[in-house]
Image (cartoon, helix red, strand yellow):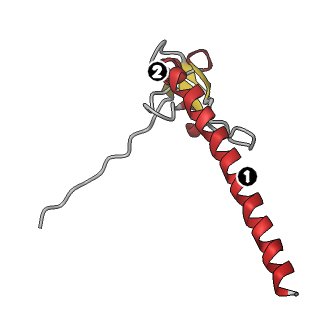
Amino acid sequence: MKKTTTKLIEVDGYYCDDCDEKITLIYSSRQCNYCFRDCCSKHRVENPLADNSGERVDYVCIDCFKIMKPFVEKIKSIQEKSDTEIEKLEKEMERLCKKYKKDKSK
């Protein structure tokens, strides 16, 4: 049986992968959500596709933001269409339920 040992590594801090500036943010706020690079506040932006209404804000690095820009409008458009379609279906379902209730009471 082979024995392995694990050494404890102490991390001095986290540094921006673009400019080497020391990052003093918590773990979830310093990393890009897509490429997981560490980013300082100068090299990250809020993720335009995330729901940032809660306590936690999702960020993406500048490079991923540039890549995702053309997709954001398309995705948001699809989401809006989807919401509209869902609303139509819910109204139709409600109409049919009311009609069924009315027909059943006759």
* Label 2: which secondary element: helix
Identity of the residue drawn at 49% across and 27% down: 38
* Horizontal relation, residue 39 to residue 106: left or right: left
Quick one: which residue is furthest to the front in this view?
Answer: 106
Identity of the residue drawn at 74% across and 44% down: 54
Nearer-the-camera pick, 69 or 89: 89
Quarter occupied by residue 72: top right
Nearer-the-camera pick, 88 or 47: 88
> What's the distance in space between the residues labelled 1 and 2, CA to CA?
32 Å
Q: Quadrant of the C terminus?
A: bottom right
Provide the residue designation for mark 2: 67
Q: Amino acid at mark 1?
A: Glu
Identity of the residue drawn at 77% across and 58% down: 91
Q: Residues within 10 Å of mark 1 (few under 14, many from 20)?
A: few
Provide the residue designation for mark 1: 87
* Label 1: which secondary element: helix
**Residue 88: percent from the left, percent from the top?**
72, 52
* Horizontal relation, residue 8 to residue 92: left or right: left
| Residue 29 visible within the image | no
Residue depth check, mark 1 versus mark 2: number of the one nearer the observer? 1
**Residue 24: percent from the left, percent from the top?**
61, 28
* Horizontal relation, residue 49 to residue 99: left or right: left
Nearer-the-camera pick, 12 or 17: 17
Q: Quadrant of the N terminus?
A: bottom left
Task: Say above or below: 67 vs 56.
Answer: above
Q: Residues within 10 Å of mark 2 (few under 14, many from 20)?
A: few
Q: Amino acid at mark 2?
A: Ile
Quick one: which residue is furthest to the top in this view?
Answer: 19
* Horizontal relation, residue 65 to residue 96: left or right: left
